[in-house]
């Protein structure tokens, strides 16, 4: 069981806006930044959002992140078919002294 | 562009030791304050962090794997390695190596994240 909680699935139609939540606790999201990763089928994870709301170079501005207290969200606007992937949140946990991941959310573009 | 590449046996017998190496393409391991990490993903499941190592040898391990894991670094070869002992079928997974980048903002707050990943290598534990 993951320490960070994500919905197992999400879906939307092309052009829609979808959000994926990530819930944690005081020792992780409550005190450290959250990062988001996108994993396309059969490939390695790719950094999508770092430090709650920062996009690495090359990531479209359709992707955005936010954080409040012990929760975080990833929003994808203007949904495209190529966004169909698994999305993971991750954060450092001060109690475990290690990295923790959410269980992942499978995004389906209908 | 910096690249990471995992290598090692794809099949390990139960109770034996899994050993993997990650080669870093440029002279980068000792050239920055980054940590270098191992993560894994069992088939059809989510990501799990195994541990991270700094070029100085400082390590952090997942509490759930700490008793079986050893990370090491060879700066002369630009490589870092993973050893996982007493493996079982539950250790079957795609193993990734990754760079944990870090920087400090103007307020002195640290920002850490895995920014570069290898392609991953599937390790199956089976007799």
Image: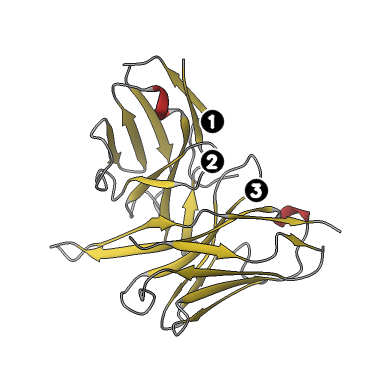
According to the picture, the residue beneath numbered tag 2 turns out to be A103
Q: Residues within 10 Å of mark 2 (few under 14, many from 20)?
A: many
Left or right: where does residue A48 sit relative to residue B46?
A: left
Q: Chain of mark 1?
A: A
- Evaluate whether residue A95 shows in this view: no
Number of the front mark, 3 or 1: 3
Q: Residue at x 32, y 30 (%)?
A: A75
The chain holding disc 2 is A
Horizontal and vertical percent for residue A107?
A: 47, 27
Question: Which quarter of the figure has residue A8?
Answer: top right
Instruction: Compute the Cα span from label 2 to label 1.
Output: 7 Å
Residue B103 in the image: above or below residue A34: below
Furthest-left residue in this view: B106
Q: Report helix, strand or loop for mark 2.
A: loop
Residue at position x 75%, y 64% from top? B87
Q: Which residue is mark 1?
A: A8
Viewer-nearest residue: A91 or B16: B16
Crowding around mark 3 (Cα neighbors within 10 Å: few <14, some 14 to 19, many 20+) is: some
The one nearer the camera, B100 or B58, is B100
Disc 3: which residue: B42
- Dot 1: within a 10 Å radius of its alpha carbon, few (fewer than 14), some, or many (20 or more) residues? some
Q: Where is residue A87 shown, x and y percent of the image?
A: 45, 37
Which corner quadrant holds the N terminus of chain A?
Answer: top right
A15 lies above or below B85: above
Q: Tell me what residue is drawn at x 52 percent, y 47 percent.
A: A3
Whether the residues at callouts 3 and 1 have beta carbons within 8 Å, the answer is no
In three-dimensional space, the C-alpha distance between marks 2 and 3, rounded to whole angstroms, equals 12 Å
Mark 2 and mark 1 lie on one chain; the one further toward the N terminus is 1
- Between the C-alphas of marks 3 and 1, the distance is 16 Å
Q: Are marks 2 and 1 on the same chain?
A: yes
């Amino acid at each position: 069981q993951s320490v960070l909680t994500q919905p197992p699935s999400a879906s939307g139609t092309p052009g829609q806006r979808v959000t994926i939540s990530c819930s944690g606790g005081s020792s992780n999201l409550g005190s450290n930044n959250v990062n988001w990763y996108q994993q396309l089928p059969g490939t390695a994870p790719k950094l999508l959002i770092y430090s709650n709301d920062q996009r690495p170079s090359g990531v479209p501005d359709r992707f955005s992140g936010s954080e409040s207290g012990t929760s975080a969200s990833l929003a994808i606007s203007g949904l495209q078919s190529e966004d169909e992937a698994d999305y993971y949140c991750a954060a450092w946990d001060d109690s475990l002294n290690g990295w923790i991941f959410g269980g992942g959310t499978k995004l389906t573009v209908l | 562009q910096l690249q990471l590449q995992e290598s090692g046996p794809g099949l390990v017998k139960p109770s034996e030791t899994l050993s993997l190496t990650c080669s870093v393409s440029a002279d980068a391991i000792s050239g920055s304050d980054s940590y270098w990490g191992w993560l894994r993903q069992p088939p059809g499941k989510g990501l799990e962090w195994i541990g991270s190592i700094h070029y100085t040898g400082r390590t952090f391990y997942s509490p759930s794997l700490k008793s079986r894991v050893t990370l090491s670094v060879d700066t002369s070869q630009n490589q870092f390695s993973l050893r996982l002992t007493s493996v079982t079928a539950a250790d079957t997974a795609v193993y990734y190596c990754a760079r944990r980048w870090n920087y400090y903002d103007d307020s002195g707050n640290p920002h850490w994240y895995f920014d570069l990943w290898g392609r991953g290598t599937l390790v199956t534990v089976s007799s």
